[in-house]
Amino acid sequence: MEGLLGFLLAGFALTGSPGPATLSLAATGAAFGARRGLGYMIGIIVGVVAVMALVASGLTGLMLALPGAASAMAALATAYIVWLAWRIATAPPLGEQASASAPSIVAGFFLGLANPKAYAAMAALFSGFVLIHGRPGTDAILKALLLVCIMTAVDLAWLLAGSALTRCFREPALNRAINVAFAVLLVASVGLALLL
């Protein structure tokens, strides 16, 4: 039971702390509202599940062992997240969004897959804890199921928190400031994740 409690606490800390996915969810909630951000949230979770599979199977280690692969992956991830930050920063105020589209489930999937923090967090969680001794496959499946539950709760909280900001700041200038602030934080979080 001690291993499970430690895993759950680490899971909440690593998946819930500010990073590209959580900040982009809050920004999406602020820019487009919680309901329009649900598909994006689901995409992020599915993308991180793909990261879990890559980490648990050892494929990430093999890919990063290729010369230049780590730099290329970091460059692609950074470019994608900068593009996403631009979309968030330039999103129109909530009242003017009839024609603006919120980030899609596909955009969420690619963010989950391109998020450098997700690889580090999943590597720490999958290698640092053993929940079921002697059965590595079952252990990995249990970890993945628990993490999906944790991520769903955490990601929904970030999406709703961002949405609450929109309710407080209906004025277009304040809404723009919130969107730009979230976009800057999103890019900064990627920079920090790549430096660590």
Image (cartoon, grey):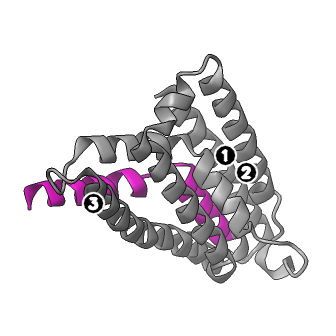
Q: Which of the marked residues, 1 or 2, is nearer the chain's N terminus?
A: 2
- 113 relative to 92 in the view: left or right: left
Label ID, residue 138: 3
Horizontal and vertical percent position of residue 18:
47, 51
The reply to whether discs 1 and 2 touch (Cβ–Cβ < 8 Å) is yes
Q: Which residue is mark 1?
A: 184
Q: Is residue 121 above or below residue 180?
A: above
Q: Is residue 68 magenta?
A: no
Q: Which residue is mark 2?
A: 85
Kindly identify the amino acid type of the residue bearing the numbered disc 3: Thr
The reply to whether discs 1 and 3 touch (Cβ–Cβ < 8 Å) is no
* Range shown magenta: 1-30
Q: Is residue 77 above or below residue 173?
A: above
> Element type at marker 1?
helix
Horizontal and vertical percent position of residue 107:
72, 60
At horizontal 59% and vertical 64% (from top left) the residue drawn is: 25
Q: Which of the marked residues, 1 or 3, is nearer the chain's N terminus?
A: 3
Q: Quadrant of the N terminus?
A: bottom left
* Residue reaching furthest to the left: 1
Horizontal and vertical percent position of residue 145:
36, 67
Q: Gap between marks 1 and 3, in whole Å?
A: 40 Å
Q: Is residue 17 magenta?
A: yes
